[in-house]
Amino acid sequence: MKSMEIFRLAASIIVCQLAGVIGSFFTRPEISGWYAALRKPSLAPPDWVFAPVWIALYTLMGVAAYLVWSKGWKEKQVRHALILFGVQLILNALWSWVFFGLRSPLAGFVEICVLSMAILITIQSFLKVSKPAGGLLIPYFLWVAFASGLNLSIWVIN
């Protein structure tokens, strides 16, 4: 692997992990306070599950972005796919602020629905450039779909 490819792969993964770090600024302070006081559905995993799952998902997302980027930034489809990816990544970090920062499960649910649509659009765009890249985003979509159900349940029962 050439040094430029290593840089692109590392940069792609780091940018995705940074979205998680940004989200954690809003999440961490609320886990033992506001969030702990909420009633949660029986399907809700223990709090410790979320960090390792997200670290793995952000890594997969970074590899997917790298695979698309490696097809050449000069290609219109590549630029379009990566712009969509950036939009959904911003929406990803924004959910933590909306749900935890604003302490609003309803607004969080609305936002995560928009995020889910953005992920699906990004997967479609990635598949046009690199089938493996699109496939790497499927676990992310499935986890967000699960998280959407949790978010909705928390809003309903609280």
Image (spheres, rainbow, N blue to C red):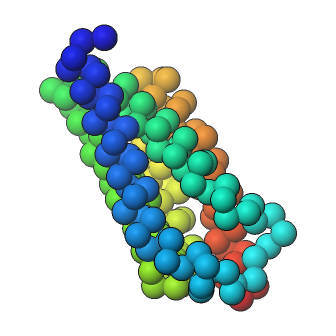
Q: Position of residue 25 (x, y in %)?
A: 41, 70
User: For the view shown, which residue lies furthest in the left direction?
Assistant: 74
Task: Determine the image quadrant of residue 148.
Answer: bottom right
Whether residue 96 sits left or right of residue 69 in the image: it is right
Looking at this view, is 122 or 139 the one in front? Answer: 139
Residue at 54% across, 65% down = 113
Q: Position of residue 35 (x, y in %)?
A: 62, 80
Residue 98 appears anywhere in the view: no
Q: Position of residue 114 (x, y in %)?
A: 47, 64
Residue at 66% across, 59% down = 48
Task: Determine the image quadrant of residue 147.
Answer: bottom right
Whether residue 35 sits left or right of residue 1 in the image: it is right
Residue at 59% across, 48% down = 52
Residue at 30% across, 40% down = 82
Quadrant assignment for the C terminus: bottom right
Task: Determine the image quadrant of residue 63.
Answer: top left
2 vs 127: above or below: above
Whether residue 20 sits left or right of residue 8 in the image: it is right
User: For the view shown, which residue lies furthest in the top direction?
Assistant: 1
